[in-house]
Image (spheres, rainbow, N blue to C red):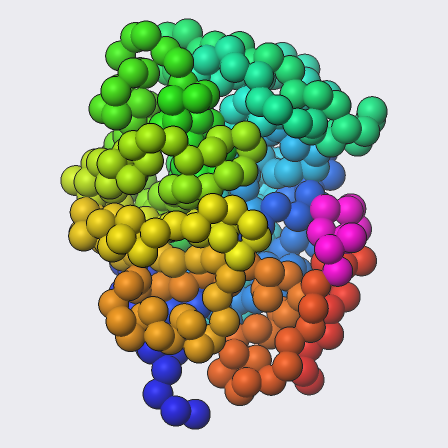
Amino acid sequence: MEHSPLFESFTLGDLTLPNRIVMAPMTRSRAINNVPNDLMARYYGARAAAGLLITEGTAPDADGLGYARIPGIFTDAQIAGWRAVTDAVHAGGGRIFIQLMHCGRIGHPLNVPAGGQIIAPSAVQPAGTMYTDSEGPQPYPVPKAMEADDLARARDGFVQAARNAIAAGFDGVELHGANGYLLDQFTHPTSNQRTDGYGGDIAGRLRFPLEVAAAVVEAIGAGRVGYRISPYGAFNDLLPFEGTEATFVALAEGLSALGVAYLHIADHESMGAPHVDEGTKAAIRKAFSGALLLSGGYDRARADADLAAGKGDLVAFGRPFLANPDLVHRLATGAAQNQPDYGTLYTPGEVGYLDYPTLD
């Protein structure tokens, strides 16, 4: 095999990654009653050859659940379920971070437990519908605008979830500040119309995300924390806005000051989102002193080229990992890849989850 930057080792916090291939976080909706299970342990364990695995979005508290059958990490049963996952990955020689995803306004009361609520920076209803197992697609409700106690509870929820993650054997956590979920909802002026210290200008809109990141860093250590952003993304009714680049450069500077291990840029242009200017990525790269994780429609050739050019330090692969448990081997050898069945991405059970063949 010719030299490939993708297969070089890399030091991330206290971890030595054997390669720079990252399994991107991808919702799979297999967690019945929001509890991780044996199917999930087998799924992640089969992909342990990646330099780093990042789990699907996982709710830090009941309010954050949003979608049907996504996992949480706020109950004893959930912690025990995740322990089986981390044990499987570590048994295969892998390293795994959990992505903490609070859905905020992207949820529905039918998908959260009794007592849970749909909250957001402001009472701004997103366009579109949310799937529910009990009643099918439903319009998003108008979320409750977060008050001071809601802010504190959500922040404390992230912190406790991070502590729970370490107790469950995770090597670290990724804070999901992308794709229109709660932390991202604070950064956007369309979803954040607050007039207190958590809204308004860039510093105000970044205050809550940076407070959450700082509290999680204090709880588990900066080397165990990553953060995901999606500048110029278009998911969940949050479109690019005037000042997008300045906002995310400022966020990168704030996260850099906290010493977080990596910043993960999600570029969904390959899935139809607006183009992310290379200048914006370069400005974020310059503003952030930790590792930069690139993602969005990569194959090996493009990954090697961007790593060789210094555009990033790690590359995340999403859809190829869905259908190829042995993706690392296929990338190394140039072998053909299975194609994912998009009809079974979010269905319960083994079909379209554990039944993709490996080369052997």
The span shown in magenta is 341-349
Q: Is residue 144 left or right of residue 31?
A: left
Front-most of residues 163 and 293: 293
Instruction: Say which quadrant the C terminus sits in.
Output: bottom right
Quadrant in which residue 302 is drawn: bottom left
**163 vs 82: above or below:** above
Q: Is residue 223 left or right of residue 272?
A: left
Q: Secondary structure of the magenta portion, mostly?
A: loop
**153 vs 247: above or below:** above
Residue 339 magenta-drawn?
no
Residue 345 magenta-drawn?
yes
- Estimate the x, y position of residue 170 in percent, counting from the top left: 45, 50
The furthest residue to the bottom: 1
Front-most of residues 154 and 45: 154
For image coordinates 34% across by 69% down, the residue present is: 306
For image coordinates 60% across by 60% down, the residue present is: 319
Total count of labels: 0
Instruction: Say which quadrant the N terminus sits in.
Output: bottom left
